[in-house]
Image (cartoon, rainbow, N blue to C red):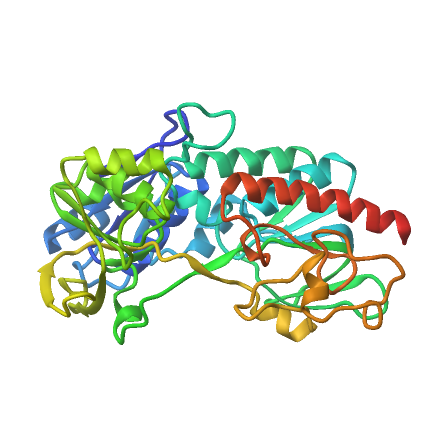
Amino acid sequence: MTKFDMNNGKSPLQLLGRRGSAEAYALRDFFYRSGVPFEWIELTTDSEAREHAQLAGLTDSRLPLCLFPDGTRLDHATIHQVCDKLGWLRAPSRTEYDLAILGAGPAGLSAAVYGASEGLKTLVIERSAVGGQAATSSRIENYLGFPEGVAGSELACRAREQALRFGAEILLLQEGVRADFAGGAGIGYLADGIRFGMRSSICASGVDYRRLNLWNEDQLRGAGVYYGAGASEADLCAHETVFVVGGGNSAGQAALHFCERARKVVILIRGDGLKETVSQYLVDRILTAANIEVLPHTEVVELHGDPILEAITIRNNQSGNEWVVNTHWLFLCLGGVPNTAWAAHSHILRDEQGYLVTGPDLRRYGVSADNWPLEREPFYLETSIPGLFAAGDVRHGSVKRCASAVGEGAMAVTFAHRYLARQ
């Protein structure tokens, strides 16, 4: 039984499930990223399932189960059901907004705070939990103003409350599928059919996790194979061997977080070492940690296990040697691919990798006075569609840092003001 309490000691809800359940992991991850205090109760035998949850056994289809402090019980609980119970699901209150923001990561939340605080009617659309990938980080230590560091989930929850206090609306578990920018103000369309007007907009949809692209990867997702830093799972890895794949700061932070509990943490990287891609303060700590091993020139080439991960095959790309190691914990911190599939339907200019092109880079990608519809030059963060801006990781040429995303979110609001003033 592991207790996660991030809300000043308030009585948490209970989440009951079995090991290796992808559905239970999805809930744990969502709770952690959203700052919801909860208690995870792992059921290991049929008798425990009957005793704790009044179920037939571990194979009962009613798992995972959520028990709320007020006595509410959700069988086979989903994130959507939990959000509904928490009162977090809502529809837009207006038919048109001054500013619509796609994504509630650091860039989107920053834009929401500055937009709403400056009087813009602001709407934020988020398909998952607030905070984006930053919310999965156990501790961000190089963010200005937090000398002791701050958990990504805590930073995200503070920003969410700040945006709501200024009057921004945040729609959770909603996904923008397309936008129509013909004839002035844009029209946004959500996956559930809701549409709304937007006088200006900011795309801060971030990136999706990059994958290994192995044949059984989807089958094991959430059942031993995890994407991102996996802060919600650290307490469950006690006395086990954890593998982290990736050579960036997120991989380094994850390894340091896991090593406090795990028996051993192994970092697998394709390159020569960590110094080229990881901040020096993380490299210094990793190299002095007694239970962290770094294996350069390596990658995972096969996953073993059904229904949960049991082992992985590792290859050394210099020697060609392969070997199998047993583990239930594989965390992939491989960076991401931009979440811009929706942009293709709106004819928004993207680069070769799918990132949104903005400002001065537009000219290099073929946008000139002949095909730019306004007399002025595009603003710095403006896309090929006037009044649509991009901020954070989704933007071509962006710096992949939390502080940079926050800065771009605030800057994009400034340009949105200038755009609206000229309309």
Name the quadrant containing residue 373.
bottom right
Q: Nearer the viewer, residue 129 or 269?
A: 269
Question: Which residue is at 78% across, 57% downward?
Answer: 378
Name the quadrant containing residue 331.
bottom left
- The quarter of the image holding the N terminus is top left
Residue 190 position, x and y percent, is 63, 65
Left or right: residue 309 versus residue 163 is left
Residue 314, relative to residue 370: is it above or below? above
Question: Which residue is at 29% across, 59% downward?
Answer: 222
Question: Which residue is at 90% across, 54% downward?
Answer: 423
Question: Which residue is at 38% across, 42% downward?
Answer: 137
Left or right: residue 194 versus residue 185 is left
Residue 74 position, x and y percent, is 37, 52
Residue 259 position, x and y percent, is 20, 39
Whether residue 260 is visible: no
Q: Nearer the viewer, residue 242 or 309?
A: 242
Whether residue 113 is visible: yes
